[in-house]
Image (cartoon, helix red, strand yellow):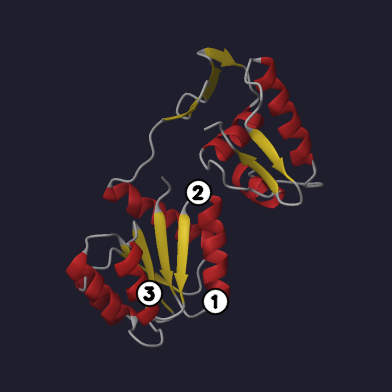
Amino acid sequence: MAEHILIADDDEGLASAVRWYLEAEGYTVSHAVDGNAAWALFQKTGADAVILDVMMPGIDGFQLCRRIREKSSVPVLMLSARDAEIDKVQALNLGADDYVTKPFGPMELVARVKSLLRRAGYQSGPALKAGALEVRTEERQALVGGRLVELPALEFDLLEALVSRPRRVLSREQLVSLVWKEFYGDERLVDTHIYRLRKRLIGAGLDPCPIVTVRGAGYAFRPAE
């Protein structure tokens, strides 16, 4: 099951951007616009990691961090527009695991969340399996029925991105951001690579292919139940 990240921040534009990047990485994300709502949500659903803005309506980030620490050792990352050392010290003394000063890049924040989850023991395994398909991420190998399927590097990266986020619909834009280091041209090029990837998997015996087109939205990996 995907790790659940709780974001507590009254800046809805920033929270939406961070949520997009986290969901593109396969996480489940909840968002609360103030401290009271975040605390209620945390008590109801819990979380595998929490991102807290320091300055929020209701309970502020410091108070919320203190409450969470009384109940849980879940990783906590604090956000603040203030970079004063005293604020960082206070956050860390309350039990926060990391402190990020605004403005920041969403990808940097995602990297920090990943690091916190790894340290907390939520690292994913080296192989992904779904029916006859096995994707060995460390060896960069794809197997169908135990037989190796030769895939170009780009197609393997697309397969890994989809298989590691089962049933999640990924748009062309999301796949580009996940797979391509640099991208020039029409995003419909993604369609060509997906077509070739499907053809190779079907040719290897994975028929029907679990990589499906979601009309008007993108692609998803939907293995048979």
Q: Position of residue 93 (x, y in %)?
A: 20, 73
Q: Is residue 32 above or below residue 147?
A: below
Q: Is residue 96 rendered to the left or right of residue 221?
A: left
The tag earlier along the polypeptide, 2 or 1, is 1
Q: Are marks 3 and 1 in contact (CB under 8 Å)?
A: no
Q: Position of residue 15 (x, y in %)?
A: 52, 70
For disc 1, the neighbor class at 10 Å (few under 14, some 14 to 19, many from 20) is few
Q: Is residue 150 rendered to the left or right of residue 67?
A: right
The tag earlier along the polypeptide, 3 or 1, is 1
Q: Which mark is residue 215?
A: none
- Dividing the image into 4 quarters, which one contains the N terminus? top left
Which residue is at a point 53% across and 55% down the rendered structure image? 23
Q: Nearer the viewer, mark 3 or mark 1?
A: 3
For disc 2, the neighbor class at 10 Å (few under 14, some 14 to 19, many from 20) is many
Which amino acid, by three-letter code, is at mark 3? Answer: Ala
Which residue is at a point 69% across and 27% down the rendered structure image? 197
Q: Which residue is mark 2?
A: 26
Q: Which residue is mark 1?
A: 12
Q: Which residue is mark 3?
A: 38
Secondary structure found at label 3: helix
Secondary structure found at label 1: helix
Q: Position of residue 21 (x, y in %)?
A: 55, 57
The one of 197 and 179 positioned closer to us in this rendering: 197
Q: Are marks 2 and 3 in contact (CB under 8 Å)?
A: no
Marks 2 and 1, how far apart at CA: 21 Å
The tag earlier along the polypeptide, 2 or 3, is 2
Which amino acid, by three-letter code, is at mark 1? Answer: Glu
Place residue 47 in its image quadrant: bottom left
The one of 42 and 224 positioned closer to us in this rendering: 224
Which residue is at a point 18% across and 70% down the rendered structure image? 70
